[in-house]
Image (spheres, rainbow, N blue to C red):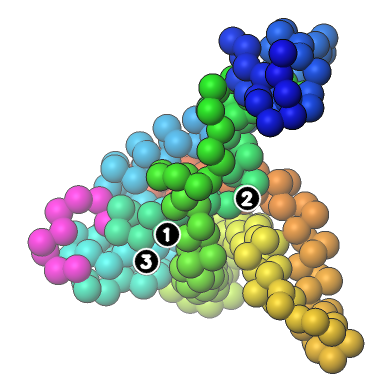
Amino acid sequence: MATDTEPHRSGHGVRGGTRAAVTAPHLRTDRWWLGPAATAAGLLAFVVYSTWRAFANDDYYAAPYVSPFYSPCLAENCVPMEAGPNLALFGDWWTLSPALIFLILPLGFRLTCYYYRKAYYRGFWASPPACAVAEPHRKYTGETRFPLILQNVHRYFFYAAVVIALILTYDTLLAFRDPEYEWGHMGLGTLLFVVNIALIWAYTISCHSCRHIVGGRLRHFSRHPVRYRLWGWVSRLNARHMLLAWASLISIALTDLYVYLLATGAFDDPRLF
């Protein structure tokens, strides 16, 4: 019989001695697996699409729009474009897709994000797959060992994600030019870019790391009214972090797809004014 100091083990994960010795993996009768299955399907679809687009190395620019996957484009093999940062800092030795240079920064930010950790822990690793469903692995070490201990670099990826968001904001401003680079244009692509950057910023600043940077380590909020107000705003966004994570992920893919369709000549960018 298990004691308080000896964990009760069955064929389905680890249970503490203070828990009921239930041998079944769970007692739930609802379709609890739909949530993690849908999460896994959504993330897998984005991974497949973004991998294809990142390695395609083509059709990522349609004046004045540049795909968010390829900005900033800092290799010599970049398609010449005036709509975004295009400095050949990496020279001609970089022969792979230029999207692979900086794509790792927003990708690392999302992979180490608290919400995405929950999403892929449940959806792919089943650790655990849902509430009230036992941990299926025989040993649980959390994020104390390699490779999951690398999740602690999330704050540093946050700083990088802010830089990328600033660059994409610049790209969005340039989207208000027409194909001849005259200001005052607004096409359907411009609207997509505006929505996309708004969602990216909302997701980025709703991050738990941003919330801690803004209002963390303060003993008296009354002595820091500005930081307290900012902390309150970020906290309200943080409550919608999951929704913003998915919305921004979808908007990035749709924006890239729109640029791809324009670049391949599938249709012309409808002009709104």
In what element is the residue under mark 2? helix
For the N terminus, give its image quadrant. Answer: top right
Residue 229 position in % (x across, y down): 83, 79
Q: Residue 242 or 145: which is nearer the viewer?
A: 145
Q: Which residue is mark 1?
A: 105
Asked whether, in this view, residue 140 is left or right of residue 227, the answer is: left
Dot 3: within a 10 Å radius of its alpha carbon, few (fewer than 14), some, or many (20 or more) residues? many
The image quarter in which residue 131 lies = top right
Farthest left residue in view: 93
Q: Residue at x 73, y 46 (%)?
A: 243
- Say which amino acid is labelled 1: Leu
Asked whether, in this view, residue 54 is left or right of residue 230, the answer is: left
Q: Which residue is mark 2?
A: 114
- Say which amino acid is labelled 3: Pro
Q: Main secondary structure of the magenta part?
A: loop
For the C terminus, give its image quadrant. Answer: bottom right
**2 and 1 marks in contact (CB < 8 Å):** no
Dot 1: within a 10 Å radius of its alpha carbon, few (fewer than 14), some, or many (20 or more) residues? many
Give the magenta part as a residue range.
90-98
Q: Residue at x 45, y 36 (%)?
A: 47
Asked whether, in this view, residue 116 is left or right of residue 216, the answer is: left
Q: How many marks?
A: 3
Check residue 251 for magenta coloring: no
* Residue 252, disc: none
Q: Which residue is mark 3?
A: 72
In what element is the residue under mark 3? loop
